[in-house]
């Protein structure tokens, strides 16, 4: 027994001695470890000095990293989620003035003006718009002849065009929207059937004004448009008529927030939609900041402070992408300040296999309504868009100054062209004393030169004798302009024709 204990003791000493030998020398099983895969004891970064002990972060570093991770994901949630909150803000705004989902259709019976806050609307056509909520079951949207517009889903993804570029080809017709996962029976005919992946849908359509007769355009919509649940028809009854709400002149907002309320809007979207309404990575992104389907969004003080800062940086990022894009493909011409709302001509913001992330954020911060028809106009049909925030010198446009811009003649528009002026803050119509916040070539008073060229002035007061060619701006307000060509012609597409830049006038 004593002999066994002695041997065990000697064995223990041998193990200890061997351990000390290994600790003091090169391990038997050693690798050639490149420095690039190791973590230094400290690293100076933009978020401070990060400290590690044998590769493990200390407590202060771990806190800093988690704060920064939550911040980065908050910023990315803003840049990614702005498409969804834009739809939600529109539906919330419609509801606030009585355009109830599945029941009402908003109509600008006296056109759009600056009292209603919309992202970059036009002031020359009658708009019809509404939201659908498919949690109530399959919904029917009937459109009248001669309109044009898209139906988009809860993430502002294009679903279908209605009207002239839709399957009804401008003849009017009924569209049946089926909820995600719906397995009930559907009519075999009579509808253009669509199966979206979200519960919320948003539609806009334009009813064109002919010969200045706005009332005729409005009456045509009221006679041919409707929105109602499918079951009210399939059960044999007459479908209930939609409630038409004249929104012209109403003060309401459809633009999503640039402060912490943004995340409240995003949470509304997530709670209203199926769990898989977007791809898993995006679902995970929103969940990482506490926005999860079926759970309350209740950030603690720490997280709320981080998200408040994140939305400030996200908003600044979106504005920078819009006001100062660094991608040269954003601009139509190398020697002009005009930019393209759809960079690369893709309504999905794709360049081959690449998603143009900056272009996507830029668009959704500036505009609404996604359809291939907006991005893929053809000579003689559709519409083309160009925007600018800067004058010929590259300086941001100032509402207290006067500018002129010349359109060489003939302007390549089969139907007509227009300028509309927007507030840099809201991206909605600039608040002025001019109802239409712009000018277009259908105006009988517009002065056009013999060769078809036109010079338009922008400023606080009209140049003498140029009142019909003047768009009012406001001192103390930054503004931007969208130039629209309806029925753009070949010189627009081959760039043999160019609009002038904004030139300051003394």
Image (spheres, helix red, strand yellow):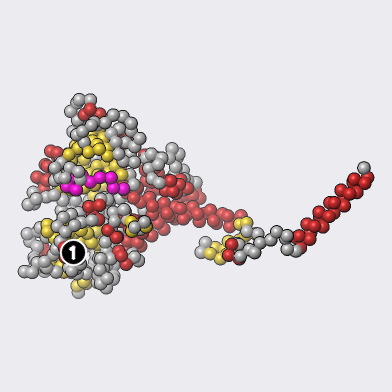
**Which of the pair 288/332 is nearer the observer?**
332
Q: Residue at x 27, y 50 (%)?
A: 370
Q: Residue at x 20, y 54 (%)?
A: 122
Q: Residue at x 21, y 72 (%)?
A: 504
Q: Position of residue 468 (x, y in %)?
A: 10, 63
Side of 64 relative to 22 (left or right): left
Q: Residue at x 90, y 45 (%)?
A: 4
**Residue 159 forms part of the magenta stretch:** yes
Q: Position of residue 207 (x, y in %)?
A: 15, 47
Label 1 sits on residue: 492
For the stretch drawn in magenta, the main secondary structure is strand
Q: Quadrant for residue 380, please give it.
A: bottom left
Tell me where the magenta segment starts and ends, as one range.
Answer: 156-165
Q: Secondary structure at mark 1?
A: helix
Question: Few, some or many C-alpha atoms within 10 Å of disc 1 (few <14, some 14-19, many ≥20)?
Answer: some
- Which quadrant of the rendered structure holds the C terminus? bottom left
**Vertical position of residue 296 compared to residue 41: above or below:** above
- Which quadrant of the rendered structure holds the N terminus? top right
Q: Is residue 88 visible?
A: no
**Vertical position of residue 203 compared to residue 401: above or below:** above
Q: Position of residue 498 (x, y in %)?
A: 19, 68
**Which of the pair 254/475 is nearer the observer?**
254
Q: Position of residue 233 (x, y in %)?
A: 21, 29
Side of 496 relative to 182 (left or right): left
């Amino acid at each position: 027994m004593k002999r066994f204990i002695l041997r065990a003791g000697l064995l223990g000493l041998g193990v200890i001695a061997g351990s000390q030998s290994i600790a003091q020398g090169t391990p038997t099983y050693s690798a050639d470890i490149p420095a690039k895969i190791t973590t230094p004891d400290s690293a100076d970064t933009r978020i401070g000095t990060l400290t590690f002990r044998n590769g493990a972060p200390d407590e202060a570093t771990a806190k800093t990293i988690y704060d920064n991770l939550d911040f980065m994901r908050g910023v990315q949630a803003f840049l990614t989620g702005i498409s969804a909150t834009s739809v939600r803000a529109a539906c919330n705004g419609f509801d606030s003035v009585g355009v109830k989902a599945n029941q009402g259709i908003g109509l600008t019976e006296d056109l759009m003006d600056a009292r209603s806050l919309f992202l970059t609307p036009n002031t020359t056509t009658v708009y019809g718009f509404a939201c659908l909520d498919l949690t109530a079951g399959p919904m029917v949207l009937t459109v009248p002849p001669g309109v044009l517009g898209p139906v988009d889903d809860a993430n502002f993804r294009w679903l279908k065009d209605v009207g002239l570029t839709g399957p009804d080809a401008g003849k009017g017709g009924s569209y049946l929207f089926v909820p995600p996962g719906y397995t009930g029976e559907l009519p075999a005919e009579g509808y253009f059937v669509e199966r979206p992946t979200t519960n919320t849908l948003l539609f806009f359509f334009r009813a064109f004004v002919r010969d200045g007769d706005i009332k005729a355009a409005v009456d045509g919509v009221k006679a041919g448009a409707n929105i109602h649940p499918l079951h009210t028809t399939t059960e044999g009854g007459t479908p209930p008529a939609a409630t038409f709400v004249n929104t012209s002149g109403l003060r309401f907002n459809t633009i999503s927030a640039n402060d912490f309320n943004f995340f409240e809007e995003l949470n509304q979207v997530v709670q209203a939609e199926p769990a898989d309404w977007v791809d898993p990575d995006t679902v995970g992104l929103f969940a990482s900041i506490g926005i999860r389907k079926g759970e309350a969004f209740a950030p603690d003080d720490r997280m709320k402070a981080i998200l408040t800062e994140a939305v400030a940086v996200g908003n600044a990022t979106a504005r920078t992408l819009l006001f100062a894009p660094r991608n040269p493909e954003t601009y139509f011409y190398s020697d002009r300040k005009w930019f393209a709302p759809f960079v690369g001509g893709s309504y999905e913001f794709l360049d081959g296999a690449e998603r143009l992330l900056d272009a996507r954020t830029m668009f959704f911060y500036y505009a609404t309504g996604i359809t291939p028809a907006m991005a893929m106009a053809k000579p003689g049909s559709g519409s083309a868009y160009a925007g600018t925030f800067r004058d010929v010198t590259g300086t941001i446009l100032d509402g207290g100054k006067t500018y002129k811009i010349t359109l060489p003649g003939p302007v390549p528009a089969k139907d007509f062209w227009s300028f509309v002026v927007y507030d840099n803050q809201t991206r909605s119509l600039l608040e002025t004393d001019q109802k239409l916040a712009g000018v277009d070539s259908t105006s009988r008073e517009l002065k056009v030169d013999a060769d078809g060229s036109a010079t338009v002035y922008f400023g606080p007061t009209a140049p003498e004798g140029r009142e019909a060619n003047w768009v009012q701006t406001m001192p103390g307000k930054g503004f931007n302009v969208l130039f629209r060509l309806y029925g753009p012609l070949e010189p627009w597409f081959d760039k043999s024709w160019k609009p002038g830049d904004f030139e300051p006038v003394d």
